[in-house]
Each structure stands twice: as structure tokens, then as C-alpha cells.
Image (cartoon, helix red, strand yellow):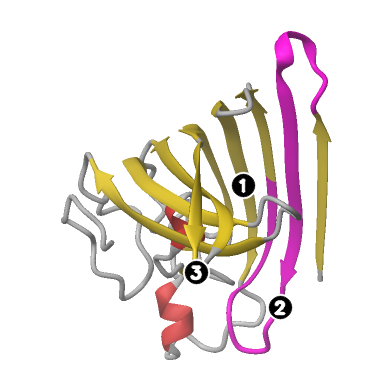
Amino acid sequence: PQLTASAFRYDLPMRLAFNLNAEYVNFDHPNYLLGKRTTLYPQLSLPLATAAFSLTPKIGIHSTQYTLDRLNLPGQDNPAAANWAGVPESQSRVLPIFSVDGGFVMERATDWFGKSLTQTLEPRAYYLYVPEKDQREIPVFDTGIAGFNYAQMFAENRYAGGDRIGDANQLTLAVTSRLIDPSGGEELLRATLGTRYYFADQSSQVFMPGEAVRTERKADI
């Protein structure tokens, strides 16, 4: 079973915005480690925007609590039992997450196969910092490595799921161009090109089982 909750408030003093994401999961399996995971992630941001420019600094505290149970583990001759021998049954992980997301939009009138359109050019920069924290003793219940795509370029976590929070000191640079019908506002075409630059190697204490630790300083395009 899983319970999720979210709360937000966008009318705080000084134009601040508040978001809260919460989750409780009780993992069960007939032959593997059992566990309960509770996550609280409050975030405070300052959205600044005009018709052409946007800038949003944000800071959050990602807190996770685990309560593990070995009741369903088979005997010690089973690898599943050996893998978690000595792992603390109660664990917590608290990480600050800081990001700055900014961009601007330029427009021009253009002609495409005899049709008058508006073309945009939208550069965007996204900086993310998450300190490293040893997570090698945290079990993996529902987490995997996220693929590198447009949405993931601007994500706070390189993993999909809550059992790993990736360390980060990185900058994503991207540019989008759209073709829009000015008469009705329909978007006819969108193209985006982007990449990510890493200012530090991936921590050897934050990885998935079987994952090769990244040492490159630049992601794919």
C-alpha cells in the first residue's frame, strides 16, 4: 500500500511559494526484505517572471525515514538474507536540494509554406546542487536509473523512485524553438536541443546495484 499527499501555497509574503510532497509506502514481499518508507519534501521557491523572462530559485529539504523488517527473509544461506545482514533496521536520510531555473523567450514573425507563423527562440538554464550522502545501506525497493531525456534534464533526481537521491553539482543548458499559429495560438512544431555539464564526479557512495559510477563531465546531447 502507498499513500501520497501534496500541499502548496503560492501567495506567501515576498512572492514566495511553498510546496510539500509526502509519501508513505509499506513494501511487502514473500521472500525479500520488508520495509516502510516515509518521505517528506517541503520546498520554498521564489518565482520571478515577466512576459519574456523567468527565474526561479528554490530550496527544499528531502527527508526519508526507513523501518526495515527481516521477517520474510529466508535462511542465512539465501543471498537475499546475506545481502542485508547487519543493515540497521531504522535509517534516515536528510538532504537539502537547491536549484535555479531561468530562461527567456524571443519571438519573430516568419513564413512557412505561405502561412504566417510566429517562431520562438527560448534558451533555458537549470542549475542543481545536492550534496552527497552515503546511501549504500539503504535497500532498493522501487527505484531505477532514469533515462536521459528532455524531462529528465531538468529533474532534481537522476533516479526514478525514492530509495536514492543522487548527488549533483550540475548545469543544464537547452534551447527550444516553436512554430505557433498567431491566429489561434496552436503550436505546430517544437524542437529542443540541450545537454548537461557536471562540475564534480558522481559520488562512489550514491549508486544503484550494478550501476557504473559516472566520471564524465558532460552528458549526451
**Which is in the foreground here, disc 1 or disc 3?**
3
| Residue type for callout 2 | Asp
Which residue: 83% across, 39% down?
A: 7
Quadrant including the N terminus: bottom right
- Helix, strand, or loop for circle 3? loop
Q: Dots 1 and 3: beta carbons under 8 Å? A: no
- The label on residue 64 is 1
Q: Residues within 10 Å of mark 1 (few under 14, many from 20)?
A: many
**184 or 49: nearer the viewer:** 184
How many numbered marks are there? 3
Task: Please tell me whether residue 27 belongs to the stretch shown in magenta.
Answer: yes
Can you give x and y, in whole percent of width and height, for residue 94 in the image?
54, 38
Mark 3 vs 2, N-terminal side: 2
Q: Dots 3 and 2: beta carbons under 8 Å? A: no
Q: Is residue 126 above or below residue 136?
A: above
**In this figure, which residue is indicated by the disc labeled 2?**
28
**In this figure, which residue is indicated by the disc labeled 3?**
113
| Residue type for callout 1 | Thr
Which residue: 46% across, 42% down?
A: 122
- Helix, strand, or loop for circle 1? strand
Q: Which residues are magenta?
A: 10-39
**197 or 78: nearer the viewer:** 197
| Residue type for callout 3 | Phe
Q: Dots 1 and 2: beta carbons under 8 Å? A: no
Can you give x and y, in whole percent of width and height, for residue 77 in the image?
42, 90
The image quadrant of residue 125 is: top left
The image quadrant of residue 36 is: bottom right
On screen, residue 31 versus residue 79, left or right, reads right
